[in-house]
Amino acid sequence: MKLFCCVTLLLSVAVAYYIYTPLPETVSEPWKLMILDAAIRSMFSVGDLFESLGVCHHVKTIRYIQESMQGLAPLPIGGPEVQETTFAGVQVRVYETSKEDKDRLRRGLVFLHGGGWAIGSTKELSYDILCRKMADELKAVIVSVEYRLAPEVHFPTQYDDCLEATKHFLKPEVLALYSVDPGHVGVSGDSAGGNLAAAVAQQISVDDSISVKFKVQALIYPVLQALDFNTPSYQQNHNVPILYRSSMVSFWLEYLDADQTLIHPMLINNHTAKNQKVLSKHRAKYDWTALLSPDFQKNYKPVVQLKGSPKILKKVPALLDVRAAPLLAEEEVLNRTPQAYILTCEHDVLRDDGLMYARRLEQAGVTVTSDHYTDGFHGIFNFAFGPINFSVGERAVRNYISWLNVHL
């Protein structure tokens, strides 16, 4: 009996030690976040283990675990009609309100899911529920794009899939088929999907061959640049769940088909050292000392290497490609993009990407609504519904849909 009690105590201590993560005082529901983070870390650890054993790429293991867990959740019943089809050869899910609403023109929204360009799916329960909710409450047609993922494909395939599917939907005859008003179409996405949404919005805005333009762009904690991994939010939140700084760099390298050994030099900004002339025309576009308010800069200092590793930009030229890093777009491009809604979270490494983009859009003359959550963390939209839900996620989704209802 004593042995059993001792083993139980030791296991309990070990589990508590594994789960416990120091968190900021203001983060939403910290103990629930710790448990969620422990589960996610375990999933990624299993992926790393399988890859080290030569079984398969760690991303494929993570996807398998996610899909298995999805199968345990009850499927939504009723609500909008859901059709799986292809737009320009790209798989999409189309969510439509009930048939009695089809006799009038409706709003349309292209939605691009997150997941570091490597995981996530239109079928993921959180995205499925979100799209159903938007279709129902906005009386809109929602097109959720199932773009291809890394490691099977890399940049620019994800971007190209999203762009081609979007261009197909924006054709007047296709909008007419779905009874969508050409004057009320938008694009949205979260995290890596926010990256793709911003890039697609830029391209659609400057492509004069496309007659239908977006009315709005709604970006949820978007990732928009890979030149500075030491912005104040990266420094402040580098170890805050559920997106760690090293994980974000790893996602970037996977997306851009680059060597994962570059993680460390990029973490210390060796790829953007001062002595690189190629960066001269871009530095002002991600200079957070000029683009962020003092409230967000706090006491953090820029991390700028004098020499660094200039070969990184030669090995990974896509780091400077605006299709991958929309924050680097020229002002004349930003000026043509639609009014924007940008949601950011205080406890998120990507906070400053969104804030800097909001500022650059405003400087270019674009109307921007910034929605910041002081108790939010990365991924709150994925935890607004279902068995693992956070109050900040529910609040954020409600405000996001309310904004779309007014502006789309």
Image: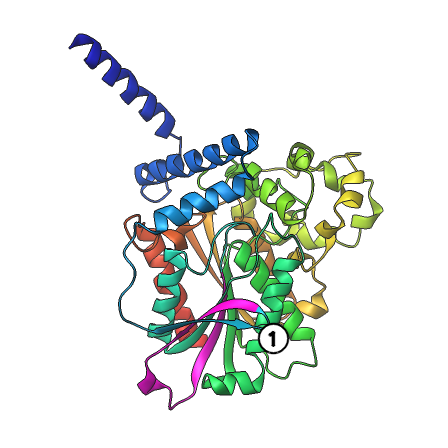
Image coordinates for residue 266, horizontal then vertical, percent: 67, 37
Q: Nearer the viewer, residue 175 or 291?
A: 175
Image coordinates for residue 93, horizontal then vertical, percent: 45, 68
Left/right of residue 222 with respect to residue 18 in the rendered view: right
Helix, strand or loop for the magenta stretch, by majority:
strand
- Compared to residue 124, the image places residue 248 above or below, namely above
Question: What colouring method underlies this structural image?
Answer: rainbow
Q: Quadrant of residue 285?
A: bottom right
Instruction: Name the residue located 20 percent from the left edge and 13 percent from the top edge.
Output: 4
Left/right of residue 315 with respect to residue 82 in the rendered view: right
Image coordinates for residue 118, horizontal then vertical, percent: 55, 49
Left/right of residue 113 with respect to residue 154 in the rendered view: left
Q: Which residue is situated farthest in the bottom direction here?
A: 103
Q: Give the range drawn in magenta.
A: 90-112
Q: Is residue 145 magenta?
A: no
Instruction: Name the residue located 67 percent from the left edge and 51 percent from the top edge.
Output: 286
Q: Which residue is situated farthest in the front direction here?
A: 55
Q: Which of 278 and 63 is in front in this view?
A: 63
Q: Nearer the viewer, residue 47 or 347?
A: 47
Instruction: Name the residue located 32 percent from the left edge and 57 percent from the top edge.
Output: 394
Image coordinates for residue 304, horizontal then vertical, percent: 71, 37
